[in-house]
Image: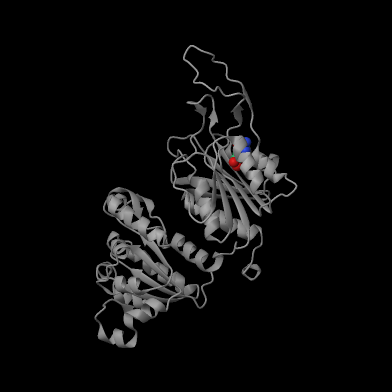
C-alpha cells in the first residue's frame, strides 16, 4: 500500500473499537500518509490523546473551543486539508449528527464544514445498528456519496452477537488503498454483469426459479462502477433496489438474459454472476395449469451465456464466471474454468445449513485461475466484489498512467 503524500484525517469516536484505530494510525503512517486525528470526548474515554498523538506524530485535536487550535489551525482548515476523512470507529451518534447537520463538537463541525470525501467504519451494538433510525441515517449518508464500510458479524464486547463489530482494520486499510490507488482505474472500460436468478415460466402463475438473491452480482456491478467502469447490469428478478449510476436491464427468462447480453457486447469485462436456469420450459401454457390437468412439462436447453461470451468473436478482455457447487467444489469449478473458457472462476460451496450463501451477506469463496487458487473464508459479498475488481485491474494490467481522462 502506497499512501505517500496523502493527507488523511482520522476521526475516532466513542467505541471500544477505538483501540483498533491506534494500529490503523501506525499502518497509515508506515504507508507514507500524513495522519491528523480528532478524538471525540467519548472516544477519549476509550483511548488517550497522548497515545493517538504519539503514533500520528501530530497533535490530537479534541476541543472545538481550544482557542490555540482556532488561531493555529481552525476547524475549517482541519476540514479542508485532508484528501480523505476516515471515521473509525463511527458511532450511531456521529452518523446521526452527520445525517441531520448537527455540529456541536469539533468532529461534527469539521464533518459539516468539509468538502472532502468521507469514509465511515461504523461500530455499535447489533440492535443499534439494525435500528431503523440508524439504517435511515446510513441510507441518507450513502445517498450523499459517503462510503460506508459495513461492520462485521460476530461477538460484541457487550456479549451480544450480530452485526456491529467495526470492520477489521486490514479491511479498512484495503478500502483506503482502493480509494487512493484503484480509484477510477477502470474509467473508459465497459463492463457487463449478469446477476440474480432467472424465472422460466410454466404458466402465467408458476415458474421454475432458484434461490439466487442477486446480492453478489449487484455488489460486483457497484464496485466496477465505483472503479469508473461503464457498467451494464443485466438482472433477473430480485428484491434489491436498482443500483444508481449504471445501465440496469431487467429480464426474467434465460433467453432474454442472453439477448440483453448480446446487445451489450462488445465489452471489455464480463462477469457472469447470475444463476441461470439450465433448462427452460419448451412451451409455457397461456392459461393456468389445473391440478388434475396436464402434468407434462417439456424442458429444453437454455443458452449458456458465460460460454457464449467467452467464445464470442468479440470476446471481452476478461471473462469471469461463478461456480456454486454442493460437492467437489474446487475440482468442479476448475473443470468449469476450462469448459467455459473463462479467465477466472469464483467457486463457492452452497447448500449447507451453516453457510447458506444464497441471500446471505457473507460467503466463502475461492478465486481459481489456470495457475492459481486463493481462498477467502467468511467474507462479505461487497469485499468479494472489491477483491474481484482488484483482480480484474491486475489481470488487465490497467495502470494509472493508462487511465482514459
Ligand atoms: O454451468 P453452471 O450453471 O454451473 O455454471 C455457472 C456459471 O455459468 C455462472 O457464472 C453462471 O452465471 C454461468 N451460466 C450462464 N448461462 C447458463 C448457465 C450458467 O451464464 N445458462
Residue 360 place in picture, x, y as percent: 43, 43
* Ligand 1 position by quadrant: top right
Identify the residue shown where x is 32% and y is 79%.
Answer: 75
Identify the residue shown where x is 63% and y is 40%.
Answer: 258
Residue 13 place in picture, x, y as percent: 30, 66
**Is 284 left, or right, of 94 in this rendering?**
right
Quarter of the figure with residue 103 = bottom left
Q: Residue furthest top?
A: 292
> Which is nearer the eye, 112 or 167?
112
The answer to whether residue 56 is seen in the rendering is no
Residue 324 place in picture, x, y as percent: 55, 39
Q: Is residue 325 above or below residue 21?
A: above
Number of numbered discs overlaid on the protein picture: 0
Q: Is residue 49 above or below residue 94?
A: below
Residue 239 place in picture, x, y as percent: 44, 41
Identify the residue shown where x is 32% and y is 57%.
Answer: 137
**Is 78 left, or right, of 233 in this rendering?**
left
The answer to whether residue 309 is seen in the rendering is yes
Q: How is the image coloured?
A: one colour
Quarter of the figure with residue 268 = bottom right
Q: Residue furthest right?
A: 313
Point out the image quarter for the C terminus.
Answer: bottom right
Amino acid at each position: 500500500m502506497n499512501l505517500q503524500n496523502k493527507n488523511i484525517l482520522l476521526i475516532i469516536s466513542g467505541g471500544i473499537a477505538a483501540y483498533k484505530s491506534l494500529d490503523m494510525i501506525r499502518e497509515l503512517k508506515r504507508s507514507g500518509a500524513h495522519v491528523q486525528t480528532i478524538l471525540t470526548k467519548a472516544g477519549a474515554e476509550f483511548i488517550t490523546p497522548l497515545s493517538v498523538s504519539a503514533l500520528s506524530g501530530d497533535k490530537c485535536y479534541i476541543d472545538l473551543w481550544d482557542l490555540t487550535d482556532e488561531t493555529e489551525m481552525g476547524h475549517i482548515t482541519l476540514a479542508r486539508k485532508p484528501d480523505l476523512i476516515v471515521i473509525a470507529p463511527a458511532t450511531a451518534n456521529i452518523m446521526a449528527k452527520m445525517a441531520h447537520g448537527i455540529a456541536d463538537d469539533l468532529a461534527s463541525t469539521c464533518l459539516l464544514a468539509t468538502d472532502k470525501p468521507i469514509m465511515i467504519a461504523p461500530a455499535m451494538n447489533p440492535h443499534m445498528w439494525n435500528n431503523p433510525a440508524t439504517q435511515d441515517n446510513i441510507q441518507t449518508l450513502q445517498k450523499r456519496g459517503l462510503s460506508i464500510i459495513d461492520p462485521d458479524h460476530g461477538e460484541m464486547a457487550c456479549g451480544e452477537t450480530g452485526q456491529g463489530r467495526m470492520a477489521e482494520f486490514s479491511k479498512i486499510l484495503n478500502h483506503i488503498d482502493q480509494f487512493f490507488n484503484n480509484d477510477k482505474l477502470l474509467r473508459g472500460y465497459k463492463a457487463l454483469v449478469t446477476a440474480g436468478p432467472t424465472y422460466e415460466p410454466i404458466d402465467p402463475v408458476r415458474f421454475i426459479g432458484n434461490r439466487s438473491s442477486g446480492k453478489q452480482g449487484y455488489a460486483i456491478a457497484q464496485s466496477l462502477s465505483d472503479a469508473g467502469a461503464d457498467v451494464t447490469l443485466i438482472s433477473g428478478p430480485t428484491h434489491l433496489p436498482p443500483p444508481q449510476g449504471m445501465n440496469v436491464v431487467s429480464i426474467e427468462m434465460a433467453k432474454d438474459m442472453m439477448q440483453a447480453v448480446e446487445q451489450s457486447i462488445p465489452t471489455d469485462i464480463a462477469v457472469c454472476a447470475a444463476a441461470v436456469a439450465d433448462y427452460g420450459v419448451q412451451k409455457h401454457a397461456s392459461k393456468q395449469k389445473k391440478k388434475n390437468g396436464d402434468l407434462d412439462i417439456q424442458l429444453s436447453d437454455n443458452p449458456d451465456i458465460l460460454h457464449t461470451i467467452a467464445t464470442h468473436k468479440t470476446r471481452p478482455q476478461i471473462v469471469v464466471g461463478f461456480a456454486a457447487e454442493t460437492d467437489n467444489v474446487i475440482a468442479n469449478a476448475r473443470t468449469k474454468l476450462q469448459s467455459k473458457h473463462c479467465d477466472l472462476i469464483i467457486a463457492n460451496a452452497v447448500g449447507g445449513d451453516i453457510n447458506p450463501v444464497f441471500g446471505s451477506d457473507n460467503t466463502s469463496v475461492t478465486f481459481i485461475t489456470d495457475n492459481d487458487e486463493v481462498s477467502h473464508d467468511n467474507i462479505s459479498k461487497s469485499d468479494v466484489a472489491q477483491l474481484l475488481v482488484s483482480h480484474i485491474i491486475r489481470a488487465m494490467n490497467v495502470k494509472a498512467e493508462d487511465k482514459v481522462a
